[in-house]
């Protein structure tokens, strides 16, 4: 690729792939950034360049399930075993970096994107009994986000939605302390 062919979209994609791969690579599922980028591209996420490319409001959960299954299948092709939790983390950090932190945070299709789930967030939600769901957050902590199956993951997202009502889902990350 020449300097003249290098676009801001490619620049964003590379950075988002790096951030997502670093965040999702965990002890029981280590992978290189190049593998994460390859998985993201195979799943179709890299084709999402603008907020309007995202699923229509109300269809994110169905599309997210499809993306997770695509990511899991692509990882399997690289001899990696991804759970729904790991697949979701890769997807969610990629989309968060590209759209939420890209200045589109209040766009209706961006506001519905799932936040990245990890132990720090779940522990903070439990410690603060966010939404009155302490028992449910504790259950999710016990399962461990990186071991979430489809129903575990979707249950946590439903709890977040119940907690936030009509607010953008990224707001739940006000409890995340990973930046410290």
Image (spheres, grey):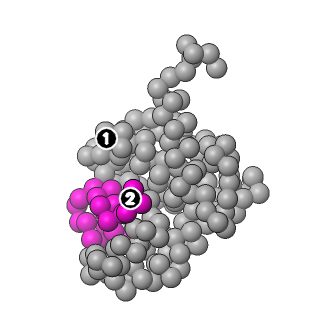
Q: Is tag 2's residue or tag 1's residue first in the polypeptide sequence?
A: 1
Mark 2, residues whose alpha carbon is within 10 Å: few (<14), some, or many (≥20)?
few
* Residue at (55% x, 43% y) in the render: 17
Mark 1, residues whose alpha carbon is within 10 Å: few (<14), some, or many (≥20)?
some
Residue 47 visible in the snapshot: no
Q: Is residue 42 magenta?
A: no
| Image side of residue 157 versus residue 13, left or right | left
* Of the two numbered discs 2 and 1 in the rendering, the one whose residue sits closer to the viewer: 2
Residue 11, image x, y percentages: 51, 30
**Res 66 → quadrant:** bottom right
Q: Main secondary structure of the magenta part?
A: helix
State the residue position of label 1: 104
| Image side of residue 48 versus residue 161, left or right | right
Total number of numbered labels?
A: 2
106 or 26: which is nearer to us? 26
Distance between mark 2 and mark 1 Cα atoms: 24 Å
Residue 22, image x, y percentages: 57, 51
Q: Is residue 42 above or below residue 124?
A: above
> In the rendered structure, which segment of residues is drawn in magenta?
157-180
Residue 86, image x, y percentages: 57, 62
* Residue at (47% x, 66% y) in the render: 118
Query: Label for residue 180?
Result: 2
Question: Circle 2 sits in a helix, a strand or a loop, which is it?
Answer: loop
Q: Is residue 124 above or below residue 74?
A: below
89 or 166: which is nearer to us? 89
Q: Is residue 177 magenta?
A: yes
* Quarter that holds the C terminus: bottom left
Q: Is residue 34 above or below residue 175?
A: above
């Amino acid at each position: 690729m020449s300097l003249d062919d290098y676009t801001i979209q490619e620049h964003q994609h590379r950075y988002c792939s790096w951030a997502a791969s670093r965040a999702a690579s965990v002890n029981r599922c280590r992978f290189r950034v190049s593998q994460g980028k390859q998985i993201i591209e195979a799943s179709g996420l890299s084709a999402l360049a603008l907020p309007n490319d995202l699923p229509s409001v109300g269809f994110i959960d169905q599309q997210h399930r499809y993306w997770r299954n695509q990511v899991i299948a692509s990882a399997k092709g690289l001899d990696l075993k991804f759970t729904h939790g790991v697949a979701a983390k890769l997807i969610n950090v990629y989309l968060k970096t590209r759209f939420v932190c890209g200045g589109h945070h209040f766009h209706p299709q961006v506001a519905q994107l799932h936040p990245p789930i990890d132990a720090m967030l779940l522990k903070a939600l439990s410690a603060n009994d966010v939404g009155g769901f302490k028992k449910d957050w504790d259950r999710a902590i016990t399962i461990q986000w990186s071991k979430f199956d489809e129903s575990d993951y979707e249950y946590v997202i439903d709890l977040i939605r119940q907690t936030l009502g009509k607010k953008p889902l990224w707001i739940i990350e006000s409890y995340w302390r990973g930046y410290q």
